[in-house]
Amino acid sequence: MDYYKFVFLIILIIGIIIYMGRVIYKNKQMETILYVAVVDVGVDFDNRLDDLETELDQYYGIEDEPNKQVLLDVGALSGDSIAASAKMTILMNPDVSDVVICDKATYDYYKDIDIYADWKDVLGSDYDAYQQYIEDDQLLNLAASKKWKDYNLVLYDPAYMVALKGAKHEEETKKLAEFFLNE
């Protein structure tokens, strides 16, 4: 009887290893075309988040490309806890995130580190069309965005979008500003 338990355990372990290998392989094949960190997401956001991800996939033209994604990271929290600080430190790295959507207090907390890109640099010749929404050269105020308000993902108003200096996907960041403010 113990023999069969041992064989079953071996088969189970092999199955788990194969499953994990497939997940790792699939994730390595996934290309993130834009990484957006959203700080302090409210409760009951799952359906709205799925709808936003679907709409962004359509906007970027990747809905039929299963290996490409716009990644919305909603796990970031502002606050003084060690876990919140560690997560925010990681997300404020341009090697990780391209864009952060946050409140003014979160922006101010990291402002002195000089990690935010000026929207004038990101938007280039389109800057004038968005200048009315930009504060401190680095904050894109989403309060005027009906689309952002419809998704109602965060606990604060206004929400600001900041681009990170040196981020990998600058053109897609520019398109995200257009997505929210060209209505």
Image: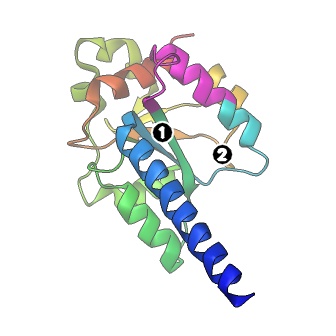
Check the image and report above or below for 162 versus 90: above
Dot 2 falls on a residue whose secondary structure is loop
Residue under the point 36% across and 46% down:
97
The picture quadrant where one finds residue 147 is top right
Marks 2 and 1 in Cβ contact (< 8 Å): no
Q: Give me the disc on residue 71.
A: 1
Please state which of residues 174 and 172 is positioned toward the viewer in this rendering. 172
Residue under the point 21% across and 28% down:
121
58 lies left or right of 86 = right
Residue 36 coordinates in the image, percent (x, y): 45, 40
User: Range of the magenta residues?
Assistant: 51-69
Q: Earlier in the sequence, mark 2 or mark 1?
A: 1
State whether residue 4 appears in this view: yes
Residue 27 coordinates in the image, percent (x, y): 42, 45
Graded by Cα atoms within 10 Å as few (under 14), some (14 to 19) or many (20 or more), the crowding at tag 2 reads: many
Nearer the observer, disc 2 or disc 1?
1
Residue 48 coordinates in the image, percent (x, y): 72, 34
Q: Is residue 103 magenta?
A: no
Check the image and report above or below for 95 versus 79: above
Graded by Cα atoms within 10 Å as few (under 14), some (14 to 19) or many (20 or more), the crowding at tag 1 reads: some
Instruction: Give the total of numbered labels.
Output: 2
Please state which of residues 117 and 168 is positioned toward the viewer in this rendering. 168
Q: Is residue 55 magenta?
A: yes
The picture quadrant where one finds residue 152 is top right
Which residue lies most toward the bottom here? 2
The amino acid marked with disc number 2 is Val
Alpha-carbon distance for marks 2 and 1? 17 Å
Residue under the point 71% across and 50% down:
42
Q: Give me the disc on residue 154.
A: 2
Check the image and report above or below for 182 versus 144: above
- Image quadrant for the C terminus? top right
- Image quadrant for the N terminus? bottom right
